[in-house]
Amino acid sequence: MKTVTQEKGFTLVELAIVMVIIGLLIGGILKGQELIKNASVSATAAQLKAFEAAYTTFIDVYGGKPGDLSTATAKIQACIGGNRCRNGDGNGWIWHANSSMSNPGATDEGVAGELYQALKHMAAADLIGGIRLNTAPGTDALISAKIGGYLYLGDILGNASYHRGSGTAFTPAGIYVSQSLHQNANPRSGRVNTPSETARLDRKIDDGVPGTGSLLAFGQETCVNGRNYRENNTEKLCAFGYKIR
């Protein structure tokens, strides 16, 4: 006598339950990614504000700009010895007059670029963290940005050599915390954040417009469309500069 085995499949109810569970899992993953992005934007906004406070405090305490201070090794105790700090030239700019703005680590007159030294001066004064003081001049000396890339501090002089991603407007002169893709690149290289990520940061800390206010978009022209970010583009096309003075 043969035993007949009945093979059962999933019922429609069981399939529906499985589909609901899968949907919930996908939704949870997407929501988690969104929360991570929002957290990185908020953390970067806090970094930029901390830079602003550190810069102001440094000038109040030491009577000169970080990086440009010509008496840094005499006034800042932690600057003494090895590669910890170099003096600036005291010309009032965080940027040697003959250096290339496209290379924060550029040197002239035998002095390491002031864009790197600005971070070392503030770190030695215990005003910012994330800097290894004992690295050689111009080496591995930028701060990692929470949103991606690296941050450095310096003057932008408002000339034709330093323009925004729109390709038509030049950056107003001032002190900027700028974002870089690499340790020795400038914001014009772009390709650090997506337009959406940069737009979120802009709305968080400024006016949400890429070419006005204190946070300006740099990088590829496809990062922005006039007064708007191309937020439907998911490529990394943008970088930013945040004007603190």
Image (tube, grey):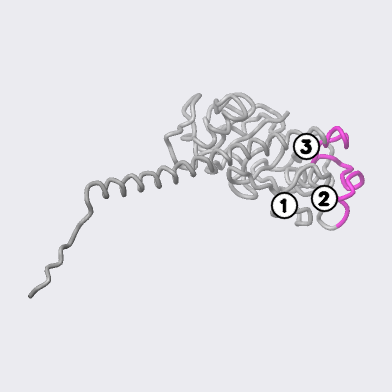
Instruction: Look at the image and say whether residue 76 sits in the magenta stretch.
Output: yes
Residue type, label 2: Cys
Residue type, label 3: Ala
Up-down relation of residue 126 to residue 242 (above or below): below
How many neighbours does mark 2 have within 10 angstroms: few (below 14), some (14-19), or many (20 or more)? Answer: many
Magenta residues, start to end: 58-81
Label 1 SS: loop
How many neighbours does mark 3 have within 10 angstroms: few (below 14), some (14-19), or many (20 or more)? Answer: some
Residue at image location 71% in from the left, 54% down from the top = 139
Up-down relation of residue 70 to residue 135 (above or below): above
Picture disc at residue 34: none
Asked which quadrant contains residue 10, the reply is bottom left
Q: Quadrant of the N terminus?
A: bottom left
Give the mark nearest the N terminus, 2 or 3.
Answer: 3
Report how far apart the C-alphas of labels 2 and 3 lie in the structure: 17 Å
Q: Position of residue 93 (x, y in %)?
A: 77, 35
Q: Is residue 77 found left or right of 191 in the rendered image?
A: right
